[in-house]
Every structure is written in C-alpha cells, then in structure tokens.
Amino acid sequence: MTEAEELMAAVRTEQEKRVRADLKIEKVFRISAAKGTGTAELKQAVIDAMPVSPAYFPPSWRTNRWERLYIQRIILLAFPDIINKNPRL
C-alpha cells in the first residue's frame, strides 16, 4: 500500500468514526454498484431491520389497481403502431 493509500484509509476510518458517533450508526456497509460487491449483506440487513406488520390489503385481493389499467397497458404494448397512428385511442 502506498503512502497516499494509507493516508486515505486513515482519513476514511476517522470520518467513519465521527459519522458513527454523530448519527449513532450501528454498522457501515461498503458496497460497489460497479463491482457488485457488498449488496447481499446490505440487503439482508435491511430485511432484518424491517418490522413485521399486518398486511395492508385482505389476502383475497390480488391488487389495489383497476383491471382497466392493466388492460390499457396490454393494449399499448401489443399495438403500438395503432396507438401512434390514432392518438385519440
């Protein structure tokens, strides 16, 4: 490790200590979207931190949206040429 890398690591560690103290953070997750690292641990921590609550909708409901909305989307995806030629549809 070069001297610059050691200095940056020390600065990062000191910053983390101050942020943890100020915000009372229990754990810091190092993730990289470019490399795809650290995301599994973060995802599991979020799941573990979520409280259990009752369902918002009855189990018999499949959705809280209109069936008409789904039909409109199906038509728009299935027939884009017709919709583009007839904008009033």
Image (tube, rainbow, N blue to C red):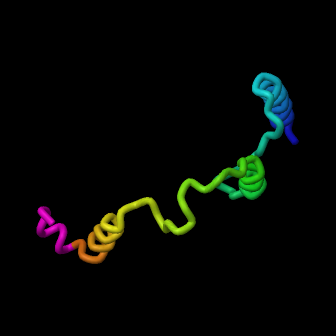
Q: Quadrant of residue 44?
A: bottom right
User: Is 59 displayed left or right of 77 in the figure?
Assistant: right
User: Is 5 displayed left or right of 62 in the figure?
Assistant: right
In the displayed orientation, state which residue is furthest to the bottom: 78
User: Residue 30 versus residue 45: which sits nearer the camera?
Assistant: 45
Q: Is residue 70 above or below residue 44?
A: below
Residue 52, position as x, y percentages in the image: 71, 51
Q: Residue sitting at 57 percent across and 66 percent down?
A: 59
Residue 29, position as x, y percentages in the image: 77, 44
Residue 77, position as x, y percentages in the image: 31, 72
Residue 71, position as x, y percentages in the image: 31, 71
Position of the N terminus, as image quadrant, is: top right
Q: How many marks?
A: 0
Q: Is residue 11 visible?
A: no
User: Residue 85 versus residue 69: which sits nearer the camera?
Assistant: 69
**Residue 77 within the magenta-colored segment of the rendering:** no
User: Is 70 displayed left or right of 88 in the figure?
Assistant: right
Q: Residue sitting at 77 percent across and 52 percent down?
A: 48
Q: Is residue 75 above or below residue 34?
A: below
Q: Residue sitting at 84 percent across and 32 percent down?
A: 13
Q: Is residue 86 above or below residue 16?
A: below
State the extent of the magenta-drawn residues as a range.
81-89
Q: Is residue 64 visible?
A: yes
Q: Residue sitting at 80 percent across and 28 percent down?
A: 24
User: Residue 55 versus residue 34: which sits nearer the camera?
Assistant: 55
